[in-house]
């Protein structure tokens, strides 16, 4: 297909003039009700609208902050470049029919080489497009038109963030800037036959990866099919798991990893690292026995360089704090050396130090991840290994006070690839880190992560030069749902599924007329279970308070539940046991704490420190009322904390010097989510674990309720929000 020229500024002005003549609207005028004249992208939006490239919605808005899909972006880009979309060849994507509304534009862009699809033969028109993906398209465009992607984004006032999803306003601004600023390019010469790439001594390595599967055992048969397909193409590809296999579903509750294990073994993982949820059962009567049993039966080594097991007797003889070139299955190492295609590849693991606050590791300790990573890299290099993978469960962009992959990549030279987990981040393409902490250039480190729940299989193909530096790469996420179930996998699943289905489907005897939601915030949802009072949070804490009062003669004044522990909604209809367990899947127990009023206030200051942003430590409450002001500085936000005094039938202020008995889950009582004031109470012997299951308490509370109210009650109020209204 013949490629069209870019418009010069003069041509665009002329084109706009024609549009003005037809519409009577100037590009400089405000066209849309939600795009004011001083909006950063107003010029671009109005110019493209006047030129007929884009249009708004029927309600008179443009919605500049709404994200665009790959299909929508294709339509806008093809329109801006004035590509011929009539005489197009079939791009042969298996998920796009000729009737698709974006078919012609996508076909035109594919023919020019400006866009392409995924390795599995799909284009995925409904997927959001990230800044990184858009920058790649601009680089493809620059092969034909004089476009500098970096300069173009800067001039268009778009702050580049590789994982951020592109908005309508950003895309409009970039396209308008490109049209207005580019000089006409000559018609391209006929494309010559591609010449074969010269032979190199580059070393090629392929990696498959998953993370945060969280007991989604039913997804494994499809994952097996996806992995088998990739291995058919590349039998030597590594398969790595970046942690959090345990906790999250009925399979985890019932089988504590033993339902996952047959699949993990059958998939032939080369290595896994340990996530924070692997340590969730540390405070149970059996302690970490389930984790130990899981590791001992594993047909692969476990890697983590910054976890100290020396004070936990159950792990005696299982951990070796060294880099092994002959790792044994069912053992834990700092790292290992694996020979792939005749070359040695070093792999080491890291587990987030945040585990001590968000799980129950007990006497297991966590060392500085930068120090341990530096030691691991040196150990590999001392053995002549210069291709190094960090298999991490520290998060792509998690709290820098603990650890995260981006800081790791900038801080530790010599790491080529970081296969990550923990933050459940969907990195559709590898993120490139090529500068250090002070902005100096460094050898490339690639970061990959495959979101969560075995929904994606990540793939990464790399080439290294003779010095072990990554010089070429291609990576993507393959959607596991698009694959059929592996028959052998279904046979493995059957006995576990039969038992789980029986538990899950048993109705408890309560019917909901509306869903009890457990929302997470987004661009459109501002109220979430981790930043606001919810009906489900109220019911959970009411059940905790009721149960606590039955088990003590003390006056229990309130109950608290961390929002991060509420993991799912309950849909309308007849409630089943499985649905209740899915809400509270971590096997927590009810605990009583004797704490001062000052400690209670400090706890609520900690709970609302990030509001209105989400925090797993946000506390839902029963028997009390909290007022806070999110406009104030963190640490000075609590306006008042009151508890319900049954004697006077009124709410009474919590007094700093008084001691109160409160109920919460054992995780929070031991200082989980950073509640240091509760940790101190636990260490002082002021906590009593009643050993009562949290999900069973919720089930009993639902059964006891004569009527379920589907509105919140004003237990938690942000006065800044009230005043703003």
Image (cartoon, rainbow, N blue to C red):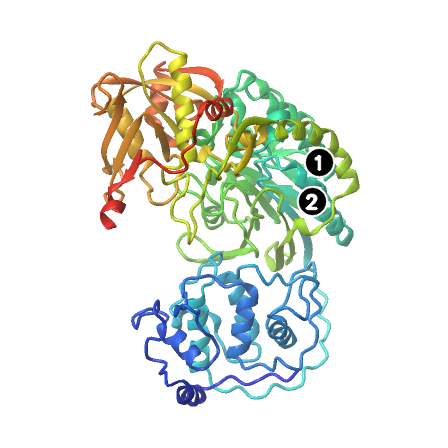
Measured as percent of width and height from the top left, residue 590 is found at: 44, 20
Compared across the picture, whether 20 is left or right of 396 comes to left
**Image location of residue 429, percent across then percent down:** 57, 57
Q: Up-down: is 22 above or below 138?
A: below
Q: Which residue is identified by label 1? A: 263
Q: Residue at x 60, y 70 (%)?
A: 101
The quadrant where residue 15 appears: bottom left
Quadrant in the rendering for residue 682: top left
In the displayed orientation, state which residue is furthest to the top: 553
Say if 96 sits above or below 722 in the image: below
Image quarter for residue 108? Answer: bottom right
Q: Earlier in the sequence, mark 1 or mark 2?
A: 2
Q: Position of residue 12 (x, y in %)?
A: 44, 86
Residue 703 % position (x, y): 49, 24
Residue behind mark 2: 223
Number of dots carrying numbers: 2
């Amino acid at each position: 297909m013949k490629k069209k020229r870019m418009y010069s500024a003069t041509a665009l002005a002329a084109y706009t003039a024609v549009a003005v003549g037809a519409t009577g609207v100037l590009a400089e005028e405000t066209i849309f009700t939600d795009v004011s004249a001083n909006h950063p992208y107003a010029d671009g939006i109005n110019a493209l609208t006047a030129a007929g490239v884009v249009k708004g919605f029927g309600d008179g808005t443009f919605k500049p902050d709404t994200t665009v899909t790959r299909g929508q972006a294709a339509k806008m880009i093809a329109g801006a470049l004035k590509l011929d979309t009539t005489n197009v060849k079939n791009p042969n994507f298996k998920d796009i029919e000729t009737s698709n509304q974006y078919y012609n534009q996508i076909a035109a862009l594919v023919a020019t080489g400006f866009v392409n699809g995924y390795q599995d033969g799909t284009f995925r028109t409904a997927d959001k497009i990230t800044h990184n993906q858009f920058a790649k398209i601009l680089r493809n465009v620059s092969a034909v038109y004089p476009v500098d992607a970096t300069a173009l984004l800067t001039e268009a006032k778009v702050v580049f963030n590789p994982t951020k999803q592109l908005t309508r306003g950003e895309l409009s601004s970039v396209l308008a800037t490109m049209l207005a600023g580019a000089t006409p390019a000559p018609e391209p010469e006929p494309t010559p036959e591609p010449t074969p790439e010269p032979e190199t001594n580059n070393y090629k390595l392929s990696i498959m990866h998953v993370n945060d599967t969280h007991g989604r055992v039913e997804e494994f048969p499809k994952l097996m099919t996806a992995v088998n397909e990739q291995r058919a193409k590349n039998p030597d590809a590594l398969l790595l798991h970046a942690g959090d296999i345990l906790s999250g579903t009925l399979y985890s509750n019932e089988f504590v990893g033993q339902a996952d294990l047959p699949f993990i073994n059958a998939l032939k993982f080369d290595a896994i690292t340990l996530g924070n949820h692997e340590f969730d059962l540390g405070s149970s009567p059996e302690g970490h026995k389930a984790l130990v049993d899981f590791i001992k039966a594993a047909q692969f080594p476990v890697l983590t360089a910054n976890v100290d097991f020396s004070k936990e007797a159950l792990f005696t003889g299982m951990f070796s704090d060294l880099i092994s070139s002959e790792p044994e299955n069912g053992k834990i190492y700092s790292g290992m050396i694996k020979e792939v295609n005749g070359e040695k590849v070093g792999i080491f693991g890291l587990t987030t130090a945040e585990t001590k606050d968000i799980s129950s590791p007990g006497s297991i300790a966590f060392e500085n991840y930068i120090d341990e990573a530096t030691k691991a890299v040196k150990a590999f290099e001392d053995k002549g290994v210069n291709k190094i993978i960090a298999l991490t469960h520290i998060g792509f962009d998690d709290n820098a006070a603990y650890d995260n992959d981006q800081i790791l990549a900038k801080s530790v030279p010599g790491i080529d690839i970081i296969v990550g987990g923990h933050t459940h981040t969907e990195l559709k393409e590898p993120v490139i880190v090529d500068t250090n902490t002070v902005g100096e250039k460094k050898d490339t480190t690639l970061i990959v992560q495959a979101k969560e729940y075995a929904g994606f299989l990540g793939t990464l193909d790399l080439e290294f030069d003779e010095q072990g530096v990554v010089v070429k790469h291609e990576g993507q996420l393959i959607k596991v749902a698009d694959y059929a179930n592996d028959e052998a996998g279904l046979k493995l699943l059957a006995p576990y599924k039969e038992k789980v289905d029986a538990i899950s489907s048993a109705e408890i005897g309560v019917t909901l007329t509306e869903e009890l939601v457990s929302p997470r915030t987004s661009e459109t949802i501002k109220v979430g279970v981790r930043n606001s009072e919810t009906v489900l949070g109220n019911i959970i804490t009411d059940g905790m308070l009721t149960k606590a009062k039955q088990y003590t003669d003390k006056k229990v004044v309130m109950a608290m539940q961390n929002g991060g522990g509420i993991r799912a909604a309950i849909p309308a209809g007849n409630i089943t046991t499985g649905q209740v367990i899915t809400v509270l899947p971590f096997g927590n127990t009810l605990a009583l704490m004797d704490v001062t009023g000052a400690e209670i206030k400090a706890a609520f200051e900690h709970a609302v420190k990030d509001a209105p942003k989400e925090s797993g430590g946000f506390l839902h409450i029963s028997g009390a009322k909290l007022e806070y002001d999110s406009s104030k500085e963190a640490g000075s936000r609590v306006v008042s904390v009151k508890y319900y005094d049954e004697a006077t039938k009124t709410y009474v202020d919590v007094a700093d010097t008084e001691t109160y008995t409160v109920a919460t889950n054992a995780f929070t009582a031991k200082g989980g989510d950073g509640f240091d004031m509760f940790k101190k109470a636990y260490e002082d012997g002021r906590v009593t674990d009643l050993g009562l299951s949290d999900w069973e308490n919720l089930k009993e509370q639902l059964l006891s309720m004569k009527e379920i109210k589907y509105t919140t009650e004003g237990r938690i109020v942000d006065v800044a929000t009230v005043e703003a209204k």
